[in-house]
Image (cartoon, rainbow, N blue to C red):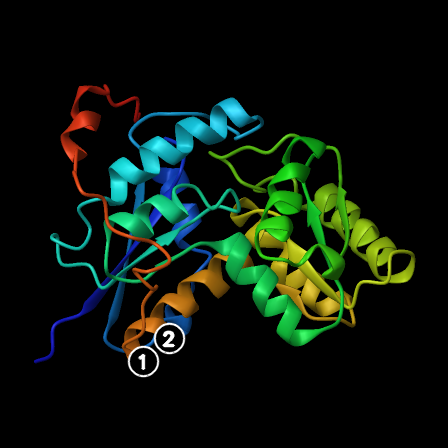
Amino acid sequence: MTPQRRILNIVPVPVPQQALDAFAAQIPANAVFPGFENVFVAARAGGTTLDSAYETTLADAMVLDAGCRAEEQGYAAVCVNSMSDSALAALRSRLSIPVVAPNQASMLTAALLGKRFSVVTMWPQWHELYHKAAREHSLTARLASVRDVGIAPNASELLSGKEDFIFEALEAQARAAIEEDGADVIILGSTTMHQCHAFLTKVLDVPVINPGVIAYKLCELLVLTGLTHSKRAYPAPALIQDDLFTVVTSTLP
């Protein structure tokens, strides 16, 4: 029997097991190609909502900690489960297996599906995540807008219990992005928003990208095709110091 090819999905903030299960639910079983297995882990410590450069820097360090030994642990790929794309470049430098993150993957996919895309997200504190990704990947001209509903995210509960008013607010912002800003593709601004994907797909007449699923499926594609990132683009470090992170005390519940 062929062993399962495991993909390590890393949530960049420490969350309880119930929340980790909710993150894992964004990738339904029927979306997983036969022979693959999803493993979800959370960062041992770090930020909470990634509301600032301070917290995203903490997330970079702790996602690197969570994934730096993935290759020797037998994983086939690593998927950063956040639109912060935490430690994406660092993990590509450290590892030879594919490393994918949702912001880059979603924007490049949106560029395939349409001419201009908008990101609809939870609150203004995340806007720079998308503008930064667009700048880094030369997609600023394709980014029609970033819109939010002005509601603080909850990494433990996601959108549970808030569906009635948040779904409608997200729909309103998505429609404004399409009708006023010229977007022909919508990207959900967070993997914590995956619960609204089916609703928005049903009510909108443009593609709606669920970033966690896109990033995961790209991991599968790279593994199946034998492709990975260029080590000329992401050279390996001369000195590996993974043990530096062992002094960090876990804050996982």
Q: Judge left or right: residue 65 versus residue 176.
A: left
The numbered mark at residue 125 is: none
Q: How many residues crowd around disc 1 within 10 Å: few (fewer than 14), some, or many (20 or more)?
A: few
Callout 1–callout 2 Cβ contact below 8 Å: yes
Please indicate whether residue 165 sits to the left or right of residue 252 in the image.
right
Q: Quadrant of residue 31?
A: bottom left
User: Would you say 75 lies left or right of 177 here?
Assistant: left
- Residue that badge 1 annotates: 225
Asked whether 160 or 16 is in front, the reply is 16
Q: Residues within 10 Å of mark 2 (few under 14, many from 20)?
A: some
The residue where tag 2 is placed is 221
Quadrant showing the C terminus: top left
Question: Which residue appears at 34% of the width and 44% of the height?
Answer: 90
Q: Amino acid at mark 1?
A: Thr
**What percent of the width, then of the height, locates residue 88?**
40, 48
Task: Look at the picture and state if 16 lies above or below 175.
Answer: above
In the rendered image, residue 69, in percent from the top left (x then y), is placed at: 17, 46
Tell me if I can see residue 78 in this picture.
yes
Say above or below: 66 vs 111.
above
| Cα distance between the residues tagged 1 and 2 | 6 Å
* Image point (50%, 22%), residue name: 54
- Residue 18 versus residue 12: which sits nearer the camera? 12
Residue type of the residue flagged with mark 2: Leu
Q: Secondary structure at mark 2?
A: helix
Element under disc 1: helix
- Residue 16 visible: no
Q: Tell me where residue 226 appears, x and y as whole percent.
A: 27, 77
